[in-house]
Amino acid sequence: MATATSPLFALEATGSLGKALTFSSLRNTGVVRSQPRPGQPRSPAQQSTRAMISFLGRTWGTIPLATRADWTAPALAQGLSAYNFYIRYNMQRWSRRSFPTQSYPATEAGTMGFGIFFSAFPYPRRILTWSQVWTVDDAWGIAVYRALTFGGIDSPSDLVYIISPVLADMNARDDYPLTPGQTYFYAFQLFSTTGKAGPLSPTRDATPTT
């Protein structure tokens, strides 16, 4: 098993983290990537890491070019590509319970209200989470958390996925596979392009059927 040779998410780190990320050096350039593995992640920490990495990876190409360019100079100073530095910097933030940012450095500027209608609907071995964002500027993501007890959502490791919100439209996502008869508790949280977090929503619960 590989072991990181530097502090968590340090810019010179090598090795593996939580069997989800691999830090390495290729031709004097730092590289960060997800470790390939079959099936679903087994631990909450691994699932949280994979959810954030997935969100950051799929949204990089949607960030305005001028904003992406801001990552280039600090990335080169660390021997990284702009994309890899963006991933590493934002995962450092997530390890400190702060949300990612499109721009470097994070400013957490502005305010991020609640601005969500939401619910959870049971189906066989799955739960459909549904949310709708309204009148919120700069909303970048909807973090969806899951716990097995009411009031148990208190850690980044409870993150199961992040939805890219469509304002004034339905944002739906299936959570599966789940155990029939087990009640799951969900909460939602908006965050902005600057890394500003909104308040955690009240809890919704649902129990998948057989």
Image (cartoon, rainbow, N blue to C red):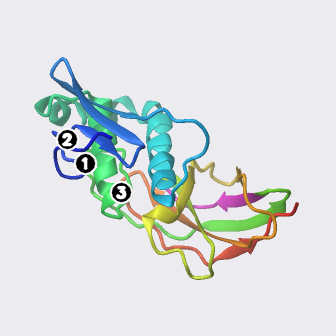
Q: Could you tell me if the residues under marks 3 and 2 are in contact, i.e. CB atoms within 8 Å?
A: no
* Image side of residue 203 versus residue 120, left or right: left
* Image side of residue 12 versus residue 197, left or right: left
Amino acid type of the residue tagged 2 in the rendering? Ala
**Residue extending furthest toward the left:** 77
Measure how far apart labels 2 and 1 are at the Cα level. 6 Å
Task: Give the magenta-colored segment's residue range.
Answer: 127-138
Please, what secondary structure does the residue beneath circle 2 have?
loop
> Which of the 4 image quarters holds residue 136?
bottom right
Amino acid type of the residue tagged 3 in the rendering? Trp
Question: Where residue 94 is drawn, which disc sits there?
Answer: 3
| 115 vs 59, nearest the viewer | 59
Question: Where residue 9 is drawn, which disc sits there?
Answer: 1
**Residue extending furthest toward the front:** 1
Residue at (18, 17) in percent of width and height: 27
Task: Tell me the quarter of the image containing the C terminus.
Answer: bottom right
| 69 vs 27, nearest the viewer | 27
Q: Residues within 10 Å of mark 2 (few under 14, many from 20)?
A: many
Measure how far apart labels 3 and 1 are at the Cα level. 10 Å
| 194 vs 120, nearest the viewer | 120
Amino acid type of the residue tagged 1 in the rendering? Phe
Nearer to us: label 3 or label 2: 2
Residue at (69, 74) in percent of width and height: 204
